[in-house]
Image (cartoon, rainbow, N blue to C red):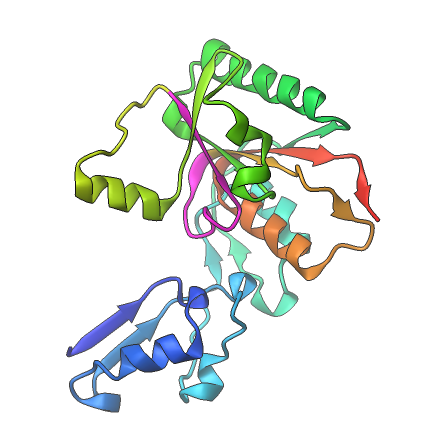
Amino acid sequence: FDAIIVDEGHDFTNEDIQDLRSLLKDGNESIFYVFQDDNQNIHKNILSRKFNIHPRKLVKNLRNTKQIFEYFRPYVDGSNLTKPFGNEGPIVKTIEFDSMNQLRSLVIQKLDYLLKQSKITHNSIFIITNKNKNSSFLSENSQIGEHKIRHFSIIDDYKATKKGTKNTNTNLVKWSTVKEFKSLESDIVFYIQEKAISYIPTTEDINDRYIGYSRAKWMLVDFINKEEDI
């Protein structure tokens, strides 16, 4: 190839990047761009050292409203902090719960308000959980209250599209885990802390919250588990 552009570079290992670079027609003379967010760097790759790449930092945050940006700011590495250039938006709503039954009820109430009273479309809302797919309460049913829900992953969606079996029903709310939704975005995000957070948050806790919060473009609702994982 004359040029390769890698998006979500933080999801690639150093070996992955090396394999991609080997596909360039003229080696270092070819064009090779990598876009990555170091706050989502699960593989801890340091491309600038490994491949002598000189990083150019993108310093403007255009995705999130200023309110959402300020909410996730504490979970961002100070050396990677961008500046908010998004519009003003609603304040971030925080809702506490101390049981799964209460959580279910609170999620239903918020969905009722947005979908029925505010006339928000189903496609504008995405639910993100910090638990894995099979242990989340969302996996137990295809409906919560009066609202149909469906698990979503970009890989499954791609496979279904290729097979012609993609679910095109727009009258349902999709949900994913933090890891599954990490490269995507939605107008409205319900971030559900099903898994209790440690009194002293782990690196994973901090990364999960940054990823979950920053997926919301216009409205963020943070469902906070009052229990602590000791």
The percent coordinates of residue 194 (x first, y second) are: 66, 37
Q: Is residue 202 above or below residue 130?
A: below
The percent coordinates of residue 230 (x first, y second) are: 84, 49
Q: Residue at x 57, y 66 (%)?
A: 80
Q: Which residues are magenta?
A: 172-187
**Residue 100's quadrant in the figure?**
top right
State which quarter of the image contains the N terminus.
Answer: bottom left
45 left or right of 7? Answer: right
75 left or right of 84? Answer: right
The percent coordinates of residue 138 (x first, y second) are: 54, 29
The verdict on residue 181 being magenta is yes
Q: Residue at x 45, y 46 (%)?
A: 181
The percent coordinates of residue 220 (x first, y second) are: 56, 35
| Near-viewer residue (36 or 99) | 99
The verdict on residue 63 being magenta is no
105 left or right of 187? Answer: right
The total of numbered circles placed on residues is 0
Q: Is residue 98 above or below residue 48?
A: above
Q: Is residue 77 above or below residue 70?
A: below
